[in-house]
Image (cartoon, coloured by chain):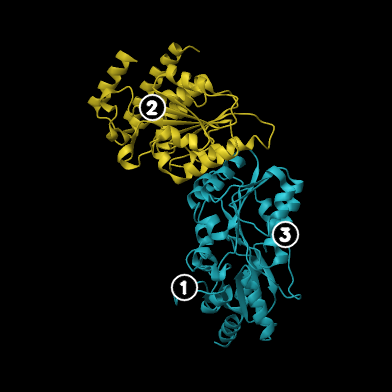
Amino acid sequence: MRKEFSACIEKIAREDQRIIFLTGDLGFMALENVRDAMGNRFINVGVSEQNMISVAAGLAAEGLIPVCYSIAPFAVFRPAEQIRVDVCLHNMNVKIVGNGGGYGYGIMGPTHHAIEDIAVLSSFQNMHCFVPFCNEDVENTVHAMFEYAGPSYLRLGFGKKQDTTIVPSFDTFRKISEGNKITVAALGPLTLNVCNAINDSGLQNDVDLFTISRIPVVRLDEKFAESIKKTKRLLIVEEHVRRGGLGENLGILILTANIGCAVKHHFASGYPNGLYGSQDYHQKINHLDVNSMADSIITFINE
Amino acid sequence: MSFNDLREIRKKSLLNLLGLYKRANAGHIGSSLSCLDILLYLYFYKMNQEDKFILSKGHAALALYVVLYESGKISLQELETYYNDGTLLAAHPPTNRRIKEIIFGTGSLGHGLSLSTGLALSNRYNEKKFNVYCVLSDGDCNEGSTWEAALFAGQHHLNNLTVIIDQNHLQGFGESKNVINLEPFVKKWEAFNFDVVVAENGNQFESLDTAFSSADIHSLKPKCIIAKTVKGHGVSYMENKMEWHYLPMSDEQYKIAIDEINRNA
């Protein structure tokens, strides 16, 4: 999604002179076009994420719109206090962009993974997390992020969709596939794993698939609520730890809405066997890959 | 305004500050007394209307509040809510931008210089021209983020940025030289591409003014004023005592402090 992001931000920055792009020394083979288009509004702040975030807050205090870019774990965890205090408590219009959410950086290892980012950030005051589900969804999502004039986080991943997958206009809940037996709520590009599971296993009429693109979710979408009332089965999938992720967020909303349904949750458990590999490897270990999705959906429907 | 006039304001601020600390039964008195003179000098003598101020050592918030009151930026009614339930004026400055003069609330050390750097940098992208003044403590200079900001300010020649170090040589749980020795301090800031001037008596307006006046206004570098201060300055039993980072005053201690200020200030 990096290419789509850099094309989109270049276009936005050309039109809006308030946008200042800060990178923590990352963006090789991805952000050159942004750098060249933005001139002195593009700053490589060096490997200093704490400073990057607070400098951004200072710029935002003067009405500018800073975008802070790094790979997801470095953009979120190192400067977490700066994000919490200088950006979120002050409700500053700072955009934080993390590339490689979840296990996106695969064999780079756990220092480079971000499987707790949503939990940390969505617990901060005023922060909204935006998660596109495929490459073609990045532009939608970036525009939605800029429409919200407050602290924002964009979680980029790897999202190559099938030609048949539709990309609806941005919303917190978006229905991607229609069926009657089970409702699936997916975060980000895992939505595509569910799409592939549906196609590979002939589940086209069975699965009501929703991608969830903005966290925290503050209220249940009507169509989503109707779906789980209808199917009475909800599978939540996210490349994120169980604590503070999509599952807990939706779970409490469903409980308080008094909707009775069976719930299963596939999430990133971390490194259960202590071994490392590609994103695909970690998805398999955590039952987030296409085959695990298909098995889980079929089993759930037949229970 | 003459420094004699400013000393009158200083006396009023001191009495106000101690009265509020006593009523609140609050600590951080020594920290506020350490930098009160710097804040008064900046607000009444140095800063223009459009200039920005960031107190990185947020625990000296009451010094800022009384100076904002004396300079007409907050009302007496607001000031008197200090430490009360439902106040904007807690022990550390508010983070909700409801007091226009307090651009950023602080309290966790190491944020102020980066924030000031961002404010200073913003002038490159808008029509505004202002100077940014940021007061740091010894403890602030332990934080890695402070030095990240210093590297950045030097790299980008932010000559509208002035850092003032309230260097009283004490920090949270010890003397700075025994905790994290910051020496050679002047050389450190110089090495980070700042123009550095030392104010030998950072609790005296004349000394501060000499230091600020000797900074090269044509330099492309950001400025660093190392103000040698005394923690607890102005109340003899508090001076250079780490415990006055934390302790509230007893009735008797308060009376001694007030008598001393009325006699000396």
Q: Nearer the viewer, mark 3 or mark 2?
A: 2
**Quarter-of-image position of residue B186:** top left
Q: Is residue B168 visible?
A: yes
**Quarter that holds the C terminus of chain A:** bottom right
Q: Nearer the viewer, mark 3 or mark 1?
A: 1
Marker disc for residue A139: 3
Marker disc for residue B228: 2
Q: Residues within 10 Å of mark 2 (few under 14, many from 20)?
A: many
Q: Chain of mark 3?
A: A
* Residue A232 image point, x, y percent: 58, 78
Give the CA distance from mark 1 to mark 2: 52 Å
Of the pair A276 and B132, the residue shown nearer to us: A276
Amino acid carrying label 3: it is Glu
Residue A22, compared with residue B19, is above or below; it is: below
Colour of chain A as rendered: cyan
Residue B24, compared with residue A179, is above or below; it is: above
Amino acid carrying label 2: it is Lys
The yellow-tinted chain is B
Give the CA distance from mark 3 to mark 1: 32 Å
* Residue A80 image point, x, y percent: 49, 52
Q: Secondary structure at mark 2?
A: strand
Q: Is residue A216 visible?
A: no
Amino acid carrying label 1: it is Tyr
Residue identifier under label 1: A271
Q: Nearer the viewer, mark 1 or mark 2?
A: 2
